[in-house]
Image (cartoon, helix red, strand yellow):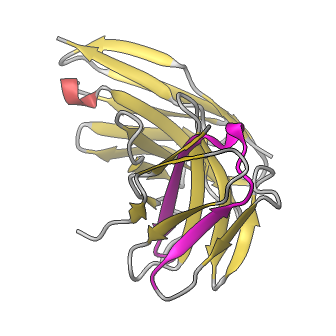
Amino acid sequence: GQSLEQPSEVTAVEGAIVQINCTYQTSGFYGLSWYQQHDGGAPTFLSYNGLDGLEETGRFSSFLSRSDSYGYLLLQELQMKDSASYFCAGHQAGTALIFGKGTTLSVSS
Amino acid sequence: EPEVTQTPSHQVTQMGQEVILRCVPISNHLYFYWYRQILGQKVEFLVSFYNNEISEKSEIFDDQFSVERPDGSNFTLKIRSTKLEDSAMYFCASSDGRDTYTGELFFGEGSRLTVL
């Protein structure tokens, strides 16, 4: 089985940089994804790491270290609209995507 | 842009009643999923469906639940004899299967089920 742990809440101000960490316990794990969810709406895909290292997509970057069972989502130049819940999610071969408990990010001006 | 659509957006039912939640996945997608999210909690996997059969299900997906793809476009979740603890947001998702290992699922806006 697998479990993913992430902080429950993070706060930051506009323009800042924030990092949301995700540690996991799993076997046969092959990738980590990040999803954003606003106000309980549809989770939307942000990024995927299938290999160790950093993936960059605009203001968002994601990192994975499989040897450390660890990943993070880095959000730069924070905007008010980035206030949302962020979920790390992973899966093993042949199993569906499994989500962490989510991190609520609050961005203030 | 193609999207996953779900109906109803909100359903209120009495305990013990049957509920059917409907989803129209993105048309060229091959993999379909149901997840649920109890208010303020994480998104929990229920079931995945491929090639007209269940490919995986979680411990939550017991005999009370069933899924069906009755035609080429709809994907339904049936909950028999609903319980209070079934109250949650139910999300349908689909993926194209071109690369099932990217983790990119496309979610609908959800159906909020309230069991009284």
Residue at position x 45%, y 78% in the image: B29
Classify B49 as above or below A62: below
Residue at position x 73%, y 50% in the image: B16
Q: Is residue A77 visible?
A: no
The residue nearer to you, when weighing B76 against B28, is B76
The residue nearer to you, when weighing B113 against A29, is B113
Q: Is residue B22 visible?
A: yes
Furthest-bottom residue in this view: B72
Residue A63: % across, % down: 47, 39
Q: Quadrant of the C terminus of chain A?
A: top left
Q: How many marks?
A: 0
Residue at position x 70%, y 61% in the image: A95
Q: Quadrant of residue A26?
A: top right
Asked whether, in this view, residue B31 is left or right of residue B55, the answer is left
Classify A8 as above or below A32: above
Residue A14 on the magenta segment: no
Residue B98: % across, % down: 48, 78
Asked whether, in this view, residue A95 is left or right of residue B62, the answer is left
Residue B116: % across, % down: 62, 37
Asked whether, in this view, residue B14 is left or right of residue B10, the answer is right
Residue B93 on the magenta segment: yes
Residue at position x 67%, y 36% in the image: A69
Boundaries of the magenta span: B73-97
